[in-house]
Amino acid sequence: MMRKIVPFLIAIACFLFAGVCVETASAADRGTEAQAKALVAKAITAFDAKGKSAFAEMTAPSTAFVDRDLYIFVIGPDRKTVAHGAAANRVGLDVMTLKDQAGKLYGKALWDLATPKGAWIDYVMEDPLTGKQVPKTSWVVRHGDYVFGCGVYKPTP
């Protein structure tokens, strides 16, 4: 009987250990709020140095302004996306029409609530690591005629 139980217990231990490793790897793949703020500051510095030409560096497929699941987005004075680190096809989108799964006009909130000192905006978005709709918060800073932002996914356990 023990010969059958020991391999079973070893298999369970390996399964549990693998689950811990997967969870740890997922946490390592996630950016933090402090890192999101730092990426926005880096993007603003690049814009100040290079002007509008910096937007190409901030847009996919460039990874100059991407860190794991963090990426820069920039909204222009016409309220359209001018840079997007995760999806170039989002450039040109009118952010005032963007809604999350709950119906929140999150693009309007990103534009309306951004301040020169920065603000956090909460909404729901698809997590690129899991494909699930999860809470997200984005740090947005109004700088001149633009809003620079970077969001942090907050997956629930």
Image (spheres, grey):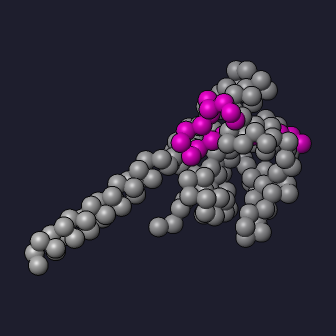
Farthest-out residue, top: 49
The answer to whether any part of residue 120 appears in the image is no
- The residue stretch that appears in magenta: 60-78
**Taking 41 as reference, is 109 above or below it?**
below
Query: Toward the viewer: 19 or 8?
Result: 8
**Taking 141 as reference, is 113 above or below it?**
below
Please report the residue visible at 82 percent of the width from the left and 51 percent of the height from the top: 95
Give the left or right position of residue 55, taking residue 11 as reference: right
Q: Quadrant of residue 51?
A: top right
Please state the horizontal and vertical placement of residue 27, each as a whole percent of the image: 44, 52
- Number of residue marks: 0
Farthest-out residue, right: 78
Q: Does the stretch in magenta take in 71?
A: yes
Q: Does the stretch in magenta take in 96?
A: no
Farthest-out residue, left: 2
Please state the horizontal and vertical placement of residue 24, each as a whole percent of the image: 38, 53
Give the left or right position of residue 47, taking residue 34 as reference: right
Query: Toward the viewer: 139 or 89?
Result: 89
Please state the horizontal and vertical placement of residue 113, each as a whole percent of the image: 74, 54
Please report the residue visible at 61 percent of the width from the left and 29 percent of the height from the top: 64
The answer to whether any part of residue 31 appears in the image is yes
Give the left or right position of residue 95, taking residue 5 as reference: right
Please state the horizontal and vertical placement of residue 80, each as a whole percent of the image: 85, 44
Query: Toward the viewer: 84 or 113?
Result: 84
Please report the residue visible at 67 percent of the width from the left and 42 percent of the height from the top: 86
